[in-house]
Image (tube, rainbow, N blue to C red):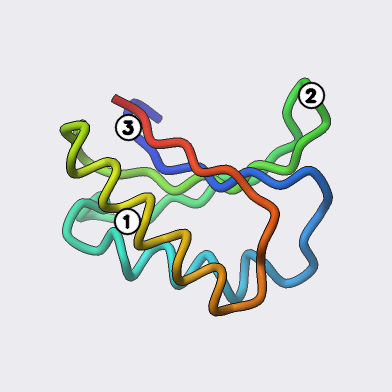
Amino acid sequence: MEHFVSVIFKEEQQGFERIAAGAVASLAEGILKEDETLLETFISEDNEYVYRVEINESLSNDDSDELAESIAQSLFKLGFDDFDIEISY
C-alpha cells in the first residue's frame, strides 16, 4: 500500500474489523481506492495490532489532521479509547 490510514492498538480488539473499520472507511470515503477497499490487519514488530485501510492519495498535513480527528471521535463514540492513528504522507 502506498497511501493508507492505520489504527493501532496495544491489544487485540475483538470485533474491530467488523464494527470500527466500517466507520474508518466511511470517514475516508472520498479518498478510498475506487476499485476496491483494501483492509489489512497484522501484528507489528512491537506486538501492536494494526488495522490499515488503503487510500488513493497522499493527504496534506491539514487534511491528514482533520481525518485523524474525525476517526478518533468516531472510535471514541464506539467505545474504543486506547489507540493511535497514522496516516501516510
Q: Quadrant of the C terminus?
A: top left
Position of 10 with respect to 73 (left or right) is: right
Which amino acid type is shown beneath numbered disc 2?
Asp
Position of 26 with respect to 18 (left or right) is: left
Label 2, label 1: how many angstroms apart (C-alpha)? 29 Å
Position of 20 with respect to 64 (left or right) is: right
Residue 46 position, x and y percent, is: 79, 24
Label 2, label 3: how many angstroms apart (C-alpha)? 21 Å
Q: Which numbered dot is residue 46? A: 2
- Look at 56% across and 45% down and name the residue there: 40
Viewer-nearest of discs 3 and 1:
3
Q: Quarter of the image holding residue 81? A: bottom right
Residue closest to the far top: 45
Task: Report which residue position mark 3 lands on.
Answer: 3
- Look at 66% across and 76% down and name the residue there: 79
Vertical relation: 2 (above or below) 15: above
Which amino acid type is shown beneath numbered disc 1?
Glu
Judge the density around disc 2: few (<14), some (14-19), many (≥20) Cα neighbours within 10 Å: few
Judge the density around disc 3: few (<14), some (14-19), many (≥20) Cα neighbours within 10 Å: some
Earlier in the chain: of badge 3 and badge 1, it is: 3
